[in-house]
């Protein structure tokens, strides 16, 4: 499926979205729930939540991303994930897929996600960690030899600069520090953590410091707000 991401994005993103909705459905009822989809882009994930009966709204700061499939998706809100125009504790689920590595202050984004969910509600946080085989996105795996080297190599090979520039729209986010950051919050508890896209028995990888940074393609954390 990943190989088809460029040629058939609808099939690829719809499948990934259905998978994410299924992962959340193991922890909560979705029908009738309010979902804040942070960095929801053109709305594949919100569409999957709606198909499951939830009221889902993509919050996306980039209009071009939002309208990538033509019209903005239903219920879309042009907004930055750091300052969600959502009242405190008013959503059941705050969802973010592959956004954290694109913001300069990951802790700020996580804090804002927690702010908008009610006690008992869930956050779904997933991102591509820097040392993942896909950490450098289109520059991968050469980012492992340094961001500047990877960018220069990309330019030489394709004759155009890469879409992402480290420090501008792609940031180094890691598995261990992110898990520690969430665990340190007194108002949330982690209910599931896994290397996303891998079979569920691969959860053990996240218990292995260092190795988890290299072999986790994408970290997924589902956490419940407790107070
Ligand atoms: C790689 S795309 C992911 C889109 C979609 N969530 C998915 O998983 O396919 C990253 C998205 O994050 C958005 N983004 C970047 N900075 C953001 C911010 N500060 N707040 C919310 N979204 C942001 C981008 O505009 C883009 O739509």
Image (cartoon, rainbow, N blue to C red):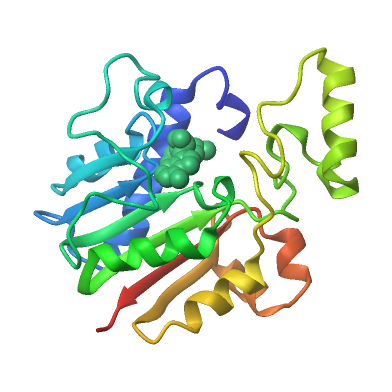
- Give the vertical position of 131 relative to 14 (above or below): below
Q: Picture quarter containing residue 215?
A: bottom right
Q: Quadrant of residue 72?
A: top left
Identity of the residue drawn at 39% across and 53% down = 82
Residue extending furthest toward the bottom: 186
Q: Give residue 79's position: percent from left, percent from top.
A: 32, 40
Q: Residue 189, located in which quarter of the rendered image?
A: bottom left
**Left or right side of 100 for 124:** left
Q: Is residue 16 visible?
A: no
Q: Nearer the viewer, residue 27 or 224?
A: 224
Residue found at the very far left of the displayed protein: 32
* Picture coordinates of residue 13, whole percent (x, y): 44, 33
User: Compared with residue 116, is residue 56 higher up or lower down, i.e. above or below?
Assistant: above
The correct choice, above or below, for 65 with respect to 112 in the image is above
Task: Indicate whether 130 appears above or below 7.
Answer: below
Residue 27 point in image, percent of width and height:
29, 69
Q: Which of 28/1 is in front?
A: 28
Q: Quadrant of the N terminus?
A: top right
Front residue of 220/88: it is 88
Q: How many marks?
A: 0
The residue nearer to you, when weighing 207 against 127, is 127
Q: Position of residue 9 (x, y in %)?
A: 48, 24
Quadrant (top left, top right, bottom left, bottom right) of the C terminus: bottom left
Q: Is residue 211 left or right of residue 203?
A: right
Q: Is residue 12 visible to us here?
A: yes
Q: Residue at x 51, y 47 (%)?
A: 98
On screen, residue 24 versus residue 125, left or right, reads left
The residue lying at 34 percent from left, 83 percent from top is 187
């Amino acid at each position: 499926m990943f190989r088809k991401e460029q040629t058939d994005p609808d099939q690829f993103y719809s499948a990934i979205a259905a998978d994410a909705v299924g992962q959340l459905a193991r922890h909560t009822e979705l029908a009738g729930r309010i979902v804040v989809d942070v960095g929801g882009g053109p709305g594949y994930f919100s569409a999957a939540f709606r198909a499951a009966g939830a009221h889902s709204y993509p919050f996306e700061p980039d209009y071009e991303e939002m309208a990538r499939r033509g019209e903005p998706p239903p219920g879309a809100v042009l907004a930055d994930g750091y300052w969600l125009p959502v009242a405190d504790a008013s959503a059941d689920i705050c969802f973010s897929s592959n956004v954290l590595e694109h913001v300069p202050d990951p802790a700020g984004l996580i804090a804002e996600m927690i702010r908008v969910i009610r006690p008992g509600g869930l956050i779904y946080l997933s991102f591509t960690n820097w040392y993942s085989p896909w950490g450098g996105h289109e520059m991968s795996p050469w980012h492992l030899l340094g961001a500047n080297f990877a960018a220069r190599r990309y330019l030489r090979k394709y004759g155009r600069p890469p879409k992402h520039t480290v420090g501008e729209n792609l940031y180094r986010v890691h598995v261990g520090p992110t898990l520690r950051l969430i665990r340190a919050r007194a108002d949330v508890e982690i209910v599931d953590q896994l290397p996303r896209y891998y079979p569920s028995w691969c959860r053990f990888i996240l218990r292995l410091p260092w190795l988890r940074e290299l072999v986790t393609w994408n970290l997924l954390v589902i956490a419940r707000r407790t107070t």
